[in-house]
Image (cartoon, rainbow, N blue to C red):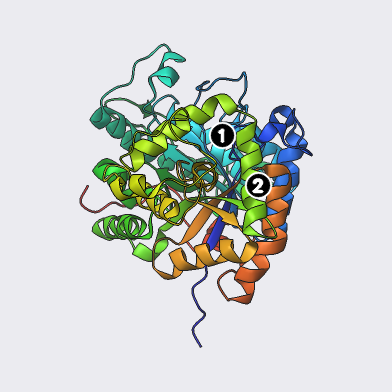
Amino acid sequence: MKKRKEMQLALQMVSGYGAEFSAWRMPGTDPAAYTNMDSYVERAKLAEKGKFQMIFIADTPGLYNDLGPQIPMFPMDPMLALMAVARETKYIGLVATLSTTFNYPYNIARQFKALDVISHGRVGWNTVTTSNPAAAANFGAQIGSRKERYNMAHESIQIVQALWGSWGQDAWTLDVEGGKFADMDKIKPINLGGQYYSSRGPLPIPPSEQGQPVIFQAGGGNEGLELAGMYASGVYANPYDIESAREHRQAVRQSAARFGRNPDDIKMYVGFMFSLGSTEEEALERRRQLMSFNPEEIPGRVSYLGSMVGLPLSVHTVDIDQPLSADMLKKAYANPMDPRSPRALKLLKQGLSIRDVLAHGVINYHPVVAGTPVQVANFLEEWFLNGACDGFSVVPDIAHDGVADFVELVVPILQERGLFHKEYEGKTLRENMGVPYQYGRLKYENN
């Protein structure tokens, strides 16, 4: 009997506190979690207990928000955070973002392959091209055109893969009696270069148990789809509804097929945020408390919500703790320019107050479920069974208890429904993702 397809889960680590910028102020949270690597290790161990396929750290090098009331968006350094986790875990994958625009391919290849060997084959590299001018300024540079950045990415990835394969798979002889540490005839320079990057090589690091790190990709558009189809085994995406998620996943699979790859060898993970409670009201109250820490942000959120539903909403003209009037609801419509708008309008028409609609996370950068473990599991099941994704990159609202609650309360429901595995398939990230072994560069069709 063929085994039923199961979803995969990645825990998005953010900066140690959770998805919400005010999470650092919640009772029980370590305010200094940003610099406490033990907190990263603890969350990773919990995720491993829950059989998550991987932890994932997004990153853009720089500071992009107000650290007066808010936490940083990213960890101090993704690779060092994963290094701390690698030594304290055994099965869970370790995926970090590193830009192809502001890092030399040799450094990328060296860092990720070394961590892959240290972790016994559990590492993945999320490739991004970086479009933030503030990040570029940190390197004394300016953001190039989209075409230029993606051309750089193609060169970078191909050089990195070549470097990863430059140490022959059987080159490490360790012949103590014969005095031969390695066979240099099987450790070759790559002498590969293009318009933006070049490298002589070789990289003096042997293969890991999975050969080389898994490549992930994040970024949309035709250029992003091409990058994913050629190189990636995992794709991180941020759709807001099932239909757009299904379309994106299908486009990713078609891109893989165009380059002669099996579409099943590329997995798409959808960003997802949650707040758990024993009741929906309890989960919403948790989010209301998070909102209350930054009251100065409420006027802007109310105004933004108004733009989503075609109404001039303001804290000065409406009571945000009451439902909208029937007359206002008659005039409301879902802004076609914002895919989150239909859900916002639906909640308003159900009679929820503006504050509670905002508490449901309608303006967050991922879909949000504030509710019971069953409600969260139902959301994940619906998206997965409708072909919207292969798995999810889940982000708890508050990390200090959100990860444990998901592992203890949501994961068992998914397992009981046959939607999530109960044991790891192997010890490497590739085994647990169900993607092929790779060592060195792939051969790309249509290239």
Q: Residue at x 51, y 56 (%)?
A: 392
Give coordinates of residue 289: x percent, y percent: 66, 39
Which residue occupies the extreme top position in the image?
Answer: 140
Q: Residue at x 56, y 52 (%)?
A: 10
| Closer to us: 223 or 311 | 311
Q: Secondary structure under badge 1?
A: helix
* Residue 90 vertical placement versus 128 (above, below): below
The residue labelled by disc 1 is 111
Give coordinates of residue 380: x percent, y percent: 51, 63
* Residue 370 vertical placement versus 85 (above, below): below
* Amino acid on which the number 1 mark rests in the picture: Gln
Q: Residue at x 30, y 60 (%)?
A: 250
Q: Are marks 2 and 1 in contact (CB under 8 Å)?
A: no
- Mark 2 and mark 1: span between their CA atoms? 43 Å
Q: For residue 77, what is the image quadrant? A: top right
Disc number placed over residue 285 in the picture, else none = 2
* Amino acid on which the number 2 mark rests in the picture: Glu
Q: For residue 114, what is the image quadrant? A: top right
Give coordinates of residue 293: x percent, y percent: 65, 30
| Closer to us: 20 or 207 | 20
- Pointer 2 local density, CA inside 10 Å: few below 14, some 14–19, many at least 20: some
Q: Secondary structure under badge 2?
A: helix
Which residue occupies the extreme bottom position in the image?
Answer: 1
